[in-house]
Image (cartoon, rainbow, N blue to C red):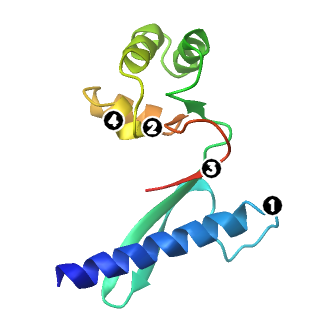
Amino acid sequence: MAAERDAALGAAMARARLWAAQALLDEPNPDLPRLDGTPVSLTLGRHVFTLSLQDTDKLADVNTTRPDDLVAYLSAADPEAGAVLAARIVAGRPHASVAGALVGMEAGLALDLAALVTAGFGGRKVEVD
């Protein structure tokens, strides 16, 4: 059972990467998931997966954004805590994921910030979660 689910999950991730690659061609296609983090369901066999694809091109990268730019960006989202949040993120670099960068933050705030940042290492990419 676990092996079957793992195989289905691998297929779901492959499908998501294909959707993302097609969407990055900048050719509008209403049949493809949007790259704005909107959840989409994918059924493979008896397994249902919820995927969200996010074009990270315009998000602040928790690993590479300059500290003062990160302060400004996060302060726009939370004026009172922007500097503190940015300092925590910078101190913990490098981060393997957005979730890792936001560990220990209040859940509602972490959810808000997760929509504003990525944990890449430069370059255009699409995160598949």
Answer with mark 1 or mark 4, whichever residue precedes in sequence: 1
Residue picked out by circle 1: 26
Residue picked out by circle 3: 125
- Find the distance from the CA under tag 1 to the CA under tag 4: 30 Å
Residue picked out by circle 4: 100
Residue positioned 39% across, 9% down in the render: 84
Please rate how many residues cluster around mark 1, counting C-alpha atoms within 10 Å: few if below 14, some from 14 to 19, many from 20: few
Residue picked out by circle 2: 114
Q: Give the number of the mark in front: 2 or 4.
A: 4
- Find the distance from the CA under tag 3 to the CA under tag 1: 14 Å
At mark 2, the secondary structure is: helix
Position of 1 with respect to 74 (left or right) is left
Answer with mark 3 or mark 4, whichever residue precedes in sequence: 4
- Report whether residue 110 is seen: yes
Q: Where's residue 104, x and y in %? A: 24, 27
Instruction: Report which quarter residue 10 is drawn in.
Output: bottom left
Position of 103 with respect to 98 (left or right) is left
- Find the distance from the CA under tag 3 to the CA under tag 2: 16 Å
**Residue 96 versus residue 28 in the image, above or below:** above
Residue positioned 38% across, 15% down in the render: 91
Position of 99 with respect to 124 (left or right) is left
